[in-house]
Image (cartoon, grey):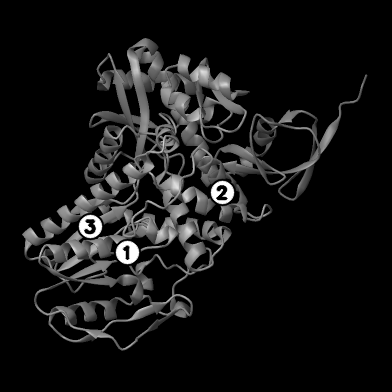
Amino acid sequence: MEAIQKVKVRINDSTYEYPVGTSLLDISIDFQKDYEHEIILAFVNDKLRELFKTVDKDCSISFVTTADNAGHKTYTRGMIIMLLKAFYAEFGKEDVEKVSVEYSLGNSLYFDYVGKLALTKERLDAVKKRMLDIVSRDIPIVKRSIGTDDAIELFSKYRMYDKEKLFRYRRVSKANIYSLDGFEDYYYGYMPPSTGMLKYFDLSIYEDGFVLILPRRKNPTLVEEFVPREKLYCTLRESNQWARMMEIPNVGALNDLISKGKLNELILVQEALQEKKVSEIAEAIKEAKDKKFIMIAGPSSSGKTTFSHRLAIQLKAHGLKPYPIAVDNYFINRDRTPRDADGNYNFECLEAIDLEQFNKDMTDLMEGKLVDLPVYNFVTGKREYKGNPISIGKEGILVIEGIHGLNDALSYSLSRESKYKIYISALTSLNIDEHNRIPTTDGRLLRRMVRDARTRGTSAQTTISMWPSVRRGEEENIFPFQEDADIMFNSALIYELAILKQYAEPVLFGVDRDSEEYLEAKRLLKFLDYFVAAPSDAVPKNSILKEFIGGSCFKV
């Protein structure tokens, strides 16, 4: 009898032997007891792999759970394909015109549905019941590779027209198709091995569609109650409606427009729409009369600085006297800045701001006093005074921009009645296709990467390494206050990723292949590959995008 060939596998500083061809899933079962959360992916020699893959030579393995970033994203994709399988089975393939994932609302994904049957609680409960049955049967999620032309034909057959259009611009010759019990679809990213691990979720009717409620990454076995975010939802819905009106709901449609030479008109129309929104906000502030502090807040790379300048211009056009104030200039000196759990400087926390000096200066300005405002030197990490005192007078309005603007703890000495709060974020209305959404965090990360490389000489690798800390700060200090805003402003531009591509790709290619950040860089490069690149010539100098790619008419 021929001896069974074995390979040596190094896991957690120990070496084990397995027969050649053993799946990563079978190996993970032996080590699941050592992990608090479920294993969903694995690194093999530092390369991310799905668990259906096998080991055929000596290697090192480390496991990824649903509590890890890549693992949580994989869990989410698995939930989407399972939901769609159950939804089409319950409603009937011929009766569903379209069911699409549109955007994220806290711990939930919002879905749109168009079809012959009404979307009711009873029918959605039936979908959930089917999903639980699929979980109990632990059905494999199977991956196969087909030619791009075959994929286009397949998507047309399944009436997935967004994907059909998207793949007409794909330069790769193959496409990976996932199948769940006969339901086939394409997904941007890896999948779980089977449905048995997709236990934690809920469904709920919300507004005109429904939400898939998911556990948060930090606690992947807990499904929290869905908390409606009406202002955020309305802002996202308005952006989606505009995108559909312009007939650009997805990347394929944007690529069509670029390839036909019609991008310039889109840029002008979208920039005009944003300027109209800024003007409407200025009008609302003027009508409020008693508002003296315009508090502008939002997550990193939302374009707060450019928005503040544009709002100031519109306020002047409405007969008011605005004075922009950047809260970042009130950072305490870097050597006194608190550090996060990883030992890095935590610039996102409220304690990184000199609250006492900020409140004293704002109060003094409103009382008509002459105040010498600081400027923070990001190179030396120190606050500087350059001898340029200002006085605003009784007619002045302070336009205050910073990530903590919506938190009254920042401006504790100023009355709530005197504040007008604006939440700004880059809430992209563009999706890859009907079942693959573009996270707003990806757009903001690319913006920041391009700006940091241009203005600070920071590598993409460094920006990526800092991003988890930035995101934690946003979750703690910004998102909890967003519904307190008087108004929300969406700074995302439907065309911007096609522009950012030419700036982001070179810095992403510079990420060291052996670094921890390479996996994220590789993912972003694959993401950008969906877009046809476009020149930035037609982008106006006052555009929010210019804050990141350069050439702004404002001091940003």
Precedes in sequence: disc 2 or disc 1: 1
Q: Residue at x 55, y 21 (%)?
A: 151
SS category of the residue bearing label 2: helix
Quadrant location of residue 44? top right
**Left or right, 177 with reference to 61:** left
Q: Residues within 10 Å of mark 1 (few under 14, many from 20)?
A: many
The disc labelled 2 sits on which kind of residue? Glu
Q: Residue at x 26, y 63 (%)?
A: 308
**Left or right, 281 with reference to 504:** left
Q: Which numbered circle lies on residue 59?
A: none
Relative height, residue 292 to residue 495 (above, below): below
The residue under label 1 is 305
Q: Residue furthest front?
A: 261
Precedes in sequence: disc 2 or disc 3: 3
The residue under label 3 is 422
Q: Nearer the viewer, residue 183 or 127?
A: 183
The disc labelled 1 sits on which kind of residue? Thr
Query: Is there CB contact under 8 Å for labels 2 and 3?
Result: no
Q: In the image, residue 36 lies at what x, y percent?
A: 55, 44
The residue under label 2 is 520
Quadrant location of residue 112? top left
